[in-house]
């Protein structure tokens, strides 16, 4: 089995990077003598978290755990470990492996890539593990197992019932308006029951989110949106930079999305930034805002008692949605893979007039394309321990050099601080390198008589 796998050569620099790999949330090294049972715990932990990379054949010796390359004599020596991988992933999905060698080093190191899985993967002891930092933590308590099932998207909180009378959704203004559009015409109660929005005589979480007039009264701190405006470009906002009290958006999921987008756009319109022609109104594509906010509302984890947060800074917008990405979805494949954490909410909100999720599965792709059309950099997607953060940056796709020359079409000179404001660059030295490159190409010269912190640059002026 393993003898059919190619052996790949690495150079000394690559070897050093493997040997010195920092053990953490996404990487680990093991001795070739590792017991299969112990290896299975790390593989399970990676698969149940965000995936990771393992190198087997790295020895640690002494109290200081000095590492060295000590690989397998041949691929067949690792057959037991490879057989373990096939037992953990019987369909051959979610993992791949290679052998690597380096001239002057003993043996072959087994490189294993483990991807985030759709299902829960148990170690050989029958227990699932999750990766937290450099630790493989067992998931044993029933509530911890349920939390993992929710994170994986195997179970959905939307199906749980809410301790409230059914008329909060069957007699609501929202359902009365909605039911007019249903074909064939029907009554709210039977239709909601048929759609499993009512279960055991109570409304479900999905039913409340979609059809209650005030879901926040029944699902506090987990069904609204908070909007913050921070007058800063700093990495985090503070009370001192908060422009006004946070705005709270409430209502059914459909109204929540449209009102949040509308209010966010209103706030953005009051922001001015330095542009090529001076102070300009900041621009973000409304399609991108709409799709990202829609995604945050429809795919969040409603079992977590935290509202969606929209944080508006001078140079970016952050949309933070409670819950990690479900199943096998990761920041790397989120544009191509689909797995709805709340399938009932996603399906039924699409039946509303002018649904917010018109093209199911295409929302984030639409957002990325809208940013490109405005010549802005693509959004950043960051999966945190208990949330997903999407950052919409107001940073141009143009190079810093292009930004400098565009500014000088309307101004006589430009300084280091101005370039940093134009481009989002944070390093003064990096900006200096931009100036030097343009100088070497004959496109800039220092402004005479200005030195030190007052130094500026201008387009070359020929001597009279």
Image (cartoon, helix red, strand yellow):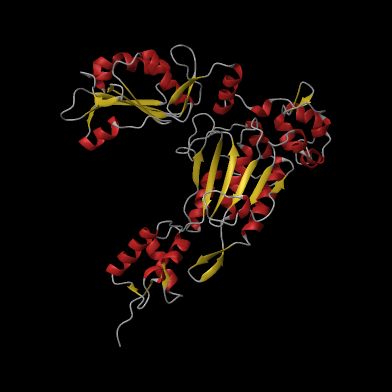
| Residue drawn where x is 53% and y is 48% of the image | 391
Question: Please, is residue 355 above or below residue 88 in the view?
Answer: below
From the top left corner, tell me how far across and down residue 309 is, in percent. 62, 44
Viewer-closest of 196 and 458: 458
Outermost residue on the left side: it is: 104
Image-based side of 128 in relation to 260, left or right: left
- Residue 317 visible here: yes
Asked if residue 91 shows in the view, the reply is no
Q: Position of residue 325 (x, y in %)?
A: 53, 34
Is residue 202 positioned above or below 411 on the image?
above
Residue 298: percent from left, percent from top: 63, 38
Q: Is residue 328 left or right of residue 82?
A: right
Pinpoint residue 198: horizontal percent, then vertical percent. Answer: 76, 26
The N terminus lies in which quarter of the figure?
A: top left
In the rendered image, which quarter contains the C terminus? bottom left
In the image: residue 317, left or right of residue 58: right
Give the residue at the far top of this rendering: 125
Horizontal side of residue 271 vs 183, given as left or right: left
- As drawn, the residue found furthest toward the front would be 63
| Total labels drawn | 0
The image quadrant of residue 443 is bottom left
Query: Image point 50% across, 66% down: which residue?
Result: 275
Front position in the image: 103 or 288: 103
Q: Residue at x 47, y 53 (%)?
A: 377
């Amino acid at each position: 089995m393993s003898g059919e796998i190619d052996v790949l050569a690495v150079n000394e620099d690559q070897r050093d990077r493997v040997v010195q790999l920092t053990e953490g949330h996404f990487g680990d090294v093991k001795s070739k003598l590792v017991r299969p049972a112990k290896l299975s715990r790390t593989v399970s932990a990676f698969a149940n978290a965000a995936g990771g990379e393992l190198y087997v054949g790295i020895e640690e010796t002494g109290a200081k755990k000095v590492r060295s390359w000590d690989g397998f004599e041949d691929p067949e020596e690792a057959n037991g470990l490879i057989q373990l991988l096939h037992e953990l992933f019987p369909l051959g999905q979610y993992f791949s492996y290679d052998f690597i060698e380096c001239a002057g080093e003993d043996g072959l190191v087994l490189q294993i890539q483990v991807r985030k899985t759709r299902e829960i993967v148990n170690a050989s002891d029958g227990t699932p593990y999750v990766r937290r930092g450099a630790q493989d933590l067992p998931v044993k308590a029933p509530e911890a197992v349920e939390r993992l099932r929710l994170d994986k998207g195997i179970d959905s909180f939307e199906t749980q019932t809410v301790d409230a009378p059914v008329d909060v959704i069957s007699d609501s203004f929202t359902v009365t308006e909605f039911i007019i559009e249903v074909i064939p015409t029907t009554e709210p109660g039977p239709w909601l029951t048929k759609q499993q929005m009512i279960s055991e005589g109570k409304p479900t979480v999905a039913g409340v989110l979609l059809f209650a007039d005030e879901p926040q009264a029944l699902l506090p701190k987990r069904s609204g949106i908070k909007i913050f405006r921070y007058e800063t470009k700093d990495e985090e906002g503070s009370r001192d930079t908060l422009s006004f009290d946070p705005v709270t958006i409430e209502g059914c999921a459909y109204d929540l999305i449209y009102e949040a987008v509308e209010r966010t756009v209103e706030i953005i319109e009051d922001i001015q930034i330095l542009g090529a022609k001076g102070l300009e109104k900041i621009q973000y594509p409304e399609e991108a805002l709409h799709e990202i906010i829609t995604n945050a509302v429809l795919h969040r984890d409603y079992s977590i008692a935290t509202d969606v947060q929209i944080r508006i800074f001078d140079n970016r917008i952050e949309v933070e949605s409670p819950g990690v990405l479900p199943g096998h979805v990761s920041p790397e494949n989120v544009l191509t893979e689909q797995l709805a954490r709340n399938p009932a909410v996603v399906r039924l909100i699409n039946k509303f007039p002018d649904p917010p999720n018109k093209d199911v599965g295409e929302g984030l792709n639409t957002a990325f394309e809208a940013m490109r059309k405005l010549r802005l950099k693509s959004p950043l997607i960051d999966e945190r321990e208990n949330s997903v953060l999407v950052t919409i940056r107001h940073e141009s796709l143009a190079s810093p050099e292009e930004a400098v020359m565009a500014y000088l079409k309307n101004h006589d000179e430009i300084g280091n601080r101005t370039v940093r404001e134009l481009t989002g660059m944070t390093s003064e030295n990096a900006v200096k390198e931009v100036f030097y490159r343009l100088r070497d190409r004959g496109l800039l010269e220092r402004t005479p008589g200005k030195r030190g912190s007052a130094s500026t640059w201008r387009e070359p002026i020929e001597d009279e």
